[in-house]
Amino acid sequence: GPDADVRYLHAPYLKGMGVEQRQEYSAFLLEMLMWTHPDLIFLSNFKAILDRIVPLAFPLKIINVHPSVLPDNKGWRTEKIALDGINPHASGYTFHVVVPNVDEGSTLFQQKVSSEGHTEESLRLATILAQSMYAPKVLSLYIASVFKFVQGKEAFKAENRESMYNGSEEHKEYRRLLFDWKGKFRTMEEIFDA
């Protein structure tokens, strides 16, 4: 909104950082973030893997938007992975809470983006465009709402994709946030009718 105090922080990183470089980068980023005293941190198109010190310093305060429908296709170049036929149903994006383990934080909101007719780059741009329409709504609702966690089969059920639940360890660990909306806990997709 017009009264929002939004600060942008530019902290360039090196592609392909090793463990030591990632730790140094994360310490630098953490220092910069501490200086700004953020209510919420949003990572968009952020490709660096953070050392655990950053999410541990800001529990439940860092939101990332990941370019796949989690829990499938975690990590890097997920558009290419979907185009290569690995979990093509996961082409899309997920807003999730950042935790020390990469792409394992609780899901807030997700949507599919069809990979049909796309190259890796055009799918990446289509995904960024699609997620940009929901980013303000997702962040506003997250910071202003009461929520609860559901996990495993219950998380898949809340997303109306219970048939995709396969009982794997990854699916058992998958977590979802439901938000109190008019006296009932719902997904953001239900709240936004998305």
Image (tube, rainbow, N blue to C red):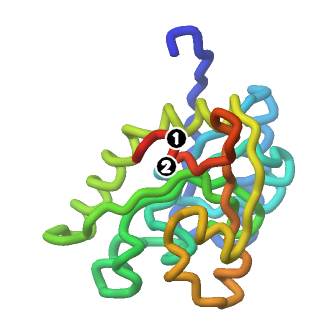
Type of residue at label 2?
Answer: Glu
Seen from the viewer's position, the closer of residues 68 and 176 is 176
Residue picked out by circle 2: 189
For marks 2 and 1, give the CA distance. 6 Å
- Element class at badge 2: helix
Q: Does residue 84 appear left or right of residue 160 in this picture?
A: left
Q: Residue 162, image x and y in percent?
A: 55, 76
Crowd class of label 2 (few under 14; some 14 to 19; many from 20; radius 10 Å): some
Residue at the image point whose x is 50% and y is 82% from the top? 163
Residue picked out by circle 1: 191
Type of residue at label 1?
Answer: Ile
Q: Does residue 122 appear left or right of residue 41 in this picture?
A: left
Q: Residue 88, image x and y in percent?
A: 34, 79
Residue found at the very far front of the displayed protein: 183
Residue 65: tell me if it is visible: no
Q: Residue 123, image x and y in percent?
A: 27, 62
Crowd class of label 1 (few under 14; some 14 to 19; many from 20; radius 10 Å): some
Seen from the viewer's position, the closer of residues 61 and 162 is 162
Q: Residue 94, image x and y in percent?
A: 51, 58
Seen from the viewer's position, the closer of residues 85 and 172 is 172
- Element class at badge 1: helix
In this picture, is 156 found above or below 99? below
On the image, which quarter does residue 147 sit in?
Answer: top right
| Callout 2 touching callout 1 (CB < 8 Å) | yes
Seen from the viewer's position, the closer of residues 45 and 170 is 170
